[in-house]
Image (cartoon, rainbow, N blue to C red):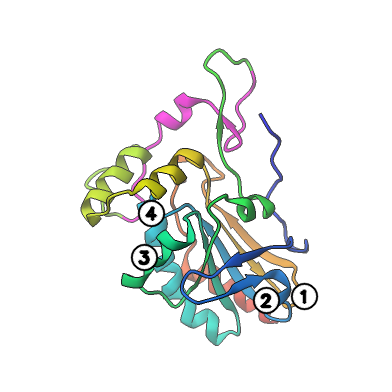
Amino acid sequence: MADQRRPLQPGEPVPAFELPIVNLEGMISHTGLRGRPFLIGFFRGLHCPFCRRQVEQLAAVQPMLNAAGVETLAVINTPLERARVYYQYRPTPVILLSDPGCHTHGAFGVPYGEFLPDESDEKPEWPYRANMAQFDAARINPTGELQDALHPMEANDVLNAKDGFELDEADKAMFANHPTQLVGHFLVDAGGRVSWSQIEALDGPNSLCNFPSTTEIILAAGDLAR
């Protein structure tokens, strides 16, 4: 199993990146953002109903961040044209960036899970190296929409059906290639250094798909402004 970079910590510089914008023309890079504080969220693709909802949650926080002088960006693990079709009908004020390879997720150190073989005697280290039993025991209902907490994969199916969302071939490919990608958020100061970060489910799979609270984000942004 390949070693992963740990999530960037406060004080560390952000890595070089350049990604196409979904809901505008052009590209955004780390150098183009220098001099402006920003919040950047890294999500799974459109195949994940929780991530679709989290982009909406981020959009709800965006006006408060904008008032604090903080730009808001979301990186989604969906090809550019597929993302443009979807967000043409569900516009958002958040600047959306496309990264179908999750390269930027990895550069910031947002983890992806790997499952140990059943016969492995290696000690599990969630979320990097987990055993399947640990994941199979997970039950989630982070948005309160489900009648009962469900296994994450079952919850995905229920919410996609509720939304009338059908995965196309691009969505299926993203899910097949990045099934265990986690979600992360980073506040970056005007000098290009991380000031705050939050990574999904570091305490275990039962907290998968939890979004940081608005209060947590705004307090962190306030610290950035001081």
Asked if the magenta segment contains residue 196, the reply would be: no
Is residue 149 at least partly visible in the picture?
Answer: no
How far apart are labels 4 and 1 at the CA level? 32 Å
**Secondary structure state at the residue bearing disc 4:** helix
Asked if the magenta segment contains residue 125, the reply would be: yes
The residue that disc 4 covers is 50
> Which of the pair 171/200 is nearer the observer?
171
Q: Residues within 10 Å of mark 4 (few under 14, many from 20)?
A: many
Compared to 194, does 133 lie above or below? above
Give the residue displayed 45% in from the left and 53% down from the top.
Answer: 45
How far apart are labels 1 and 3 at the CA level? 34 Å
**Secondary structure state at the residue bearing disc 1:** loop
Look at the image and tell me in which quarter the N terminus lies. Answer: top right
The residue that disc 3 covers is 85
Dot placed on the residue nearer the N-terminal end, 1 or 2 = 1
Dot placed on the residue nearer the N-terminal end, 4 or 1 = 4
- Do callouts 4 and 2 mark residues in contact (Cβ within 8 Å)? no
Q: Where residue 100 sits in the image (x, y, percent)?
A: 53, 53
Tell me the amino acid under the disc marked 3.
Val
The residue that disc 2 covers is 224
Tell me the amino acid under the disc marked 1.
Gly
How far apart are labels 4 and 2 at the CA level? 28 Å
The residue that disc 1 covers is 191
Q: Where residue 87 sits in the image (x, y, percent)?
A: 37, 68
Foreground label between 1 and 3:
3
Look at the image and tell me in which quarter the C terminus lies. Answer: bottom right
How far apart are labels 1 and 2 at the CA level? 11 Å
Quadrant assignment, res 67: bottom right
Q: Where residue 99 sits in the image (x, y, percent)?
A: 55, 57
**Secondary structure state at the residue bearing disc 3:** helix
Dot placed on the residue nearer the N-terminal end, 4 or 2 = 4
